[in-house]
Image (tube, rainbow, N blue to C red):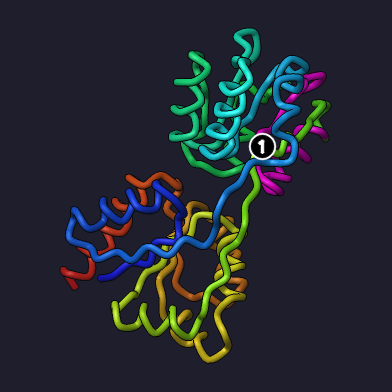
Amino acid sequence: MSVLVTRPGQPGEALCHQLQAVGIKAVHHPLIDFHAGSELEQLPVRLKQCDLVIAVSRQAVLYSQEYLDLHGFSWPSDIRYLAIGQKTAQLLSNFTQQTVNYPAISDSENFLSLPELSAPVGLRVEILRGNGGRDLIARQLKSQGAAVNYCEVYQREMLPFNTRVAVSGWQKAAIDCVIITSEQQLRFFVTQLAEYNMPWLLNQTFYVPSERIAHDAQSLGIKHTIAVGSASNSDLVAAILAEKNDRNHE
C-alpha cells in the first residue's frame, strides 16, 4: 500500500512520517503554497469590531499571529473564538489564551451546529480565511441575521506540475491511495491530469475529510472514495491503517 500525500508544507511532511512509521509508504507532492493575504493589515481593526472570530485553517491562525506579533497587537480577550478543526482550534487557543470550540466533524455543516451559533441574530462575525472558501458558513449565518465579514489573511497558490513525469513516478512507487484535504485541491489535481492519465486516476482510492468532498470526487468520476470525517493527520493515518489491515485479512 502506497499513499500520495498532497497536503502542503510541514503538516504534509509530518503526515508522510506518520504513515511511514506504521509501515505505509508515502510520497509527498504538495498541490498548493501559501502567502500573506491582501487584507492582513486590516486584521487589528477587524478584531476590534467583531463579537466572534472564526478561523478556517491553521494557515489563517499562523499568518494572523505573525502579523499581530510583528506590529505589536494581541488577540482581544473580550470576544469569542471558533475554529473549523481540532488542530486549528488548539493553535488558536494557544495564541489567544482562550477556549476555542470546534465541531467533532471538520466541515461547514457540522460547524454551523455549534452552540455558539445557535442564535446569531445581530452577531458580528469575522471569518479569517484564504482567498475564497467557507461560503456556506457565511451564507447561513447571514440568513439568520448575523453580520459577517471575511478577512483574507493568507492566499493560496496552486502549484502546476508535469503530469506525464509525475504520474510515471507515482506508478513506479505503486501509489494506490491519494489524500486530498480540500475541494479546491481535488479539482485542481483532477484538471492537471491529462486525459491519458485518467485510467490511473480512477483506479486510486481517495481519502478526503468529509462526505461533501467525497461527493465532489464522485461527480468528477472518481469511483473509490473514503470520507474520514476529519482532516487531522492522526485520523487520516488511522483510516488508511484500517484499510491496510482490511486488505491484509482479505
Q: Is residue 87 left or right of residue 39?
A: left
Which of 159 and 123 lies nearest the eye of the viewer?
159
Per the image, the residue denoted by label 1 is 153
Q: Is residue 198 magenta?
A: no
The answer to whether residue 138 is above or below residue 45 is: below
Total numbered labels placed on residues in the image: 1
Q: Is residue 18 left or right of residue 106?
A: left
Asked which secondary structure carries label 1, the reply is: loop
Q: Residue at x 39, y 47 (%)?
A: 10
Residue 17: x %, y % from top left: 26, 53
Highlighted magenta segment, given as a residue range? 120-142
The answer to whether residue 185 is above or below residue 201 is: above
Which of 198 and 131 lies nearest the eye of the viewer?
131
Identify the amino acid type marked 1: Val
Q: The C terminus is located in which quarter?
A: bottom left
Residue 114: x %, y % from top left: 59, 28
Q: Residue at x 45, y 47 (%)?
A: 231
Q: Residue at x 28, y 70 (%)?
A: 2
The answer to whether residue 57 is above or below residue 166 is: above
Q: Is residue 131 magenta?
A: yes
Which of 27 and 198 lies nearest the eye of the viewer?
27
- Give the quadrant of residue 154: top right
Q: The N terminus is located in which quarter?
A: bottom left
